[in-house]
Image (tube, grey):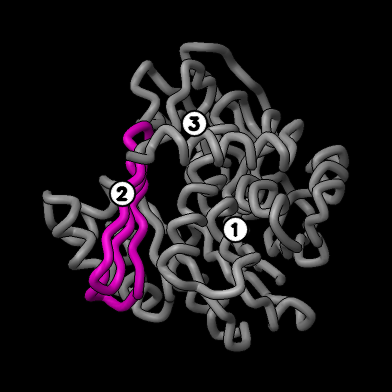
């Protein structure tokens, strides 16, 4: 099964209470692709500048990520610089340089348009709809967003949401988009906007998923060490959609299993800066933590 992701590839400079990392590999499409690559074939559509290090391209290729949709243009790569205090649920942005990403308009290669699973990472909702116009009858589409688009392009975002199967966002975004302080009520309102399922990330407090007369709640995997939460949400998305892609049927049990896999992958991603932990991660470790997660949440 093929998985298409459209999003950003970036160079991040991050500071947390536990260390710093400068000009490391980041971006929504990056984290998603690496996470999903443990389960299936990933096709990436993104843009980088001519300064993007070849070592990062080699790493992504080594994970089996199809980079024919990654364009390298004259100019500088998208950069983000920020920090986290001890409340690791909130990122503080110091600087954003869009660079070549500013004019990004995703053109989906012909050989990608039949992808069965599509992840619309956190980009302009107009571009997300543009991607949906180009793909042919995917089995499942998953859309992410952020507070900036909720504030600046709400009508366009609502149009995109009405066209996707699943919506993925964090708790503050869910409350903001639904204009509802209660998270469960917010999820119900978001479901009424079109998606068959709404998945709400709650950081260190786990995730909830609402479907058609279904509700699923999962805590976060208990960790003693969290170095960098950057990319955790996109890693969840990659693990989730990757796990979904290997299921034979998208029933309730399959989707719940995928939520657990997404949470497992995210728990590994935060154990080091950038994709460093995912770089050394093995499928055996993923399956071991999945089984442990199942054991500690079963009663």
Q: SS of the residue at dot 2?
A: strand
Disc 1 versus disc 3: distance between alpha carbons? Answer: 21 Å
- Counting residues from the N terminus, which is met first, the one under dot 2 or under dot 3? 2
Which residue corresponds to mark 3? Answer: 229
- Residue 130: x and y in percent read 53, 78
Q: Is residue 52 above or below residue 193?
A: above
Q: Residue at x 69, y 64 (%)?
A: 45
Q: Residue at x 31, y 78 (%)?
A: 194
Question: Mark 2 and 3 residues: CB-CB less than 8 Å, in contact?
Answer: no
Near-viewer residue (153 or 238): 238
Q: Is residue 147 something one can see in this rendering?
A: no
Q: Nearer the viewer, mark 1 or mark 3?
A: 1
Coordinates of residue 290 in the picture (x, y in percent): 55, 41
Horizontal side of residue 296 vs 28, given as left or right: left
Q: Is residue 170 magenta?
A: no
Q: Dot 1, how many residues are within 10 Å of its Cα: few (below 14), some (14-19), or many (20+)?
A: many
Residue 217, which numbered label? 2
Which mark sits nearer the N-terminus, 1 or 2? 2
């Amino acid at each position: 099964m093929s998985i298409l992701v459209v999003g950003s590839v970036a160079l991040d400079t991050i500071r947390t209470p536990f260390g710093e990392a400068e000009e490391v590999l980041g971006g929504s499409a990056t984290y998603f692709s690496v996470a999903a690559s443990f389960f299936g074939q990933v096709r990436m559509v993104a843009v980088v500048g001519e300064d993007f290090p070849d070592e990062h391209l080699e790493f992504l290729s080594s994970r089996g990520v199809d980079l024919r949709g990654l364009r390298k243009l004259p100019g500088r790569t998208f950069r983000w610089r920020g920090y986290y205090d001890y409340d690791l649920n909130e990122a503080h942005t110091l600087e954003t340089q869009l660079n070549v990403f500013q004019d990004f308009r995703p053109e989906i290669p012909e050989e990608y348009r039949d992808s069965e699973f599509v992840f619309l990472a956190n980009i302009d909702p107009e571009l997300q709809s543009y991607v949906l116009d180009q793909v042919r009858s995917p089995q499942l589409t998953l859309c992410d967003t952020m507070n900036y688009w909720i504030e600046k392009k709400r009508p366009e975002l609502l149009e995109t949401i009405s066209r996707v199967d699943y919506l993925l966002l964090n708790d503050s975004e869910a409350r903001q988009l639904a204009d509802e302080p209660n998270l469960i009520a917010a999820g119900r309102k978001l479901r009424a906007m079109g998606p068959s399922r709404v998945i709400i990330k709650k950081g260190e407090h786990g995730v909830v998923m609402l479907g058609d007369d279904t509700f699923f709640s999962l805590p976060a995997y208990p960790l003693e060490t969290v170095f960098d939460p950057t990319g955790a949400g996109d890693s969840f998305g990659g693990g989730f959609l990757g796990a979904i892609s290997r299921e034979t049927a998208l029933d309730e049990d399959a989707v719940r299993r995928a939520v657990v896999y997404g949470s497992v992958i995210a728990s590994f991603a935060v154990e080091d800066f950038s994709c460093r932990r995912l770089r050394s991660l093995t499928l055996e470790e993923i399956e071991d933590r999945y089984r442990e997660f199942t054991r500690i949440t079963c009663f």
